[in-house]
Amino acid sequence: MSEETVPQQGGAPAAAQPKGLLQQMEELMAALNADLSALDADFQSTGAVQRGREKRVT
């Protein structure tokens, strides 16, 4: 029996391949890395503003 005649489970399109665990983990790690980079940029900009305020007060 070829792949075309095998019924798909869960109604997934025939062209879609299920993602392996490693691929899912890589995608999650990439998304986490992007989120952490954005958070770090926010902290860096906030920290620069705070340091600037401290310099003006003293």
Image: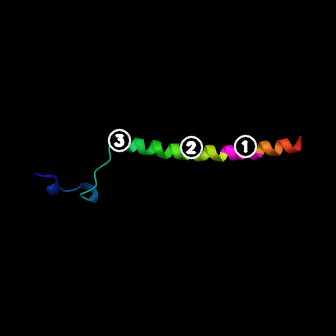
Specify whether 27 is left or right of 20.
right
Type of amino acid at the residue the image marks with label 3? Leu
Please tell me which residue lies in front, 27 or 1.
Answer: 27
Q: Mark 2 falls on what kind of element? A: helix
Q: Which mark is residue 21?
A: 3
Quadrant housing the C terminus: top right
As measured in the structure, the alpha-carbon distance from the residue carrying label 3 to the one carrying label 2 is 22 Å
Q: Residue at x 29, y 49 (%)?
A: 18
* Residue 36 placement (x, y as % from top left): 56, 43
Q: Mark 1 falls on what kind of element? A: helix
Please tell me which residue lies in front, 50 or 2.
Answer: 50
Identify whether 21 is placed above or below 8: above
Please tell me which residue lies in front, 10 or 22.
Answer: 22
Range shown magenta? 43-49
* Residue 31 placement (x, y as % from top left): 48, 47
As measured in the structure, the alpha-carbon distance from the residue carrying label 1 to the one carrying label 3 is 38 Å
Q: Which mark is residue 47?
A: 1
> Image quadrant of residue 23?
top left
Type of amino acid at the residue the image marks with label 2? Leu
**Residue neighbourhood size for the residue with mark 3, other residues' Cα within 10 Å, grouped as few (<14), some (14–19), many (≥20):** few
Which numbered disc, 1 or 3, marks the residue that appears first in the sequence?
3
Q: Nearer the viewer, mark 1 or mark 3?
A: 1
Specify whether 1 is left or right of 12.
left
Q: Which mark is residue 30?
A: none
As measured in the structure, the alpha-carbon distance from the residue carrying label 1 to the one carrying label 2 is 16 Å
Q: Residue at x 78, y 42 (%)?
A: 51
* Residue 6 placement (x, y as % from top left): 16, 54
Which numbered disc, 3 or 2, marks the residue that appears first in the sequence?
3
User: What is the total number of numbered labels drawn onto the structure image?
Assistant: 3
Specify whether 55 is left or right of 45.
right
Q: Which mark is residue 36?
A: 2
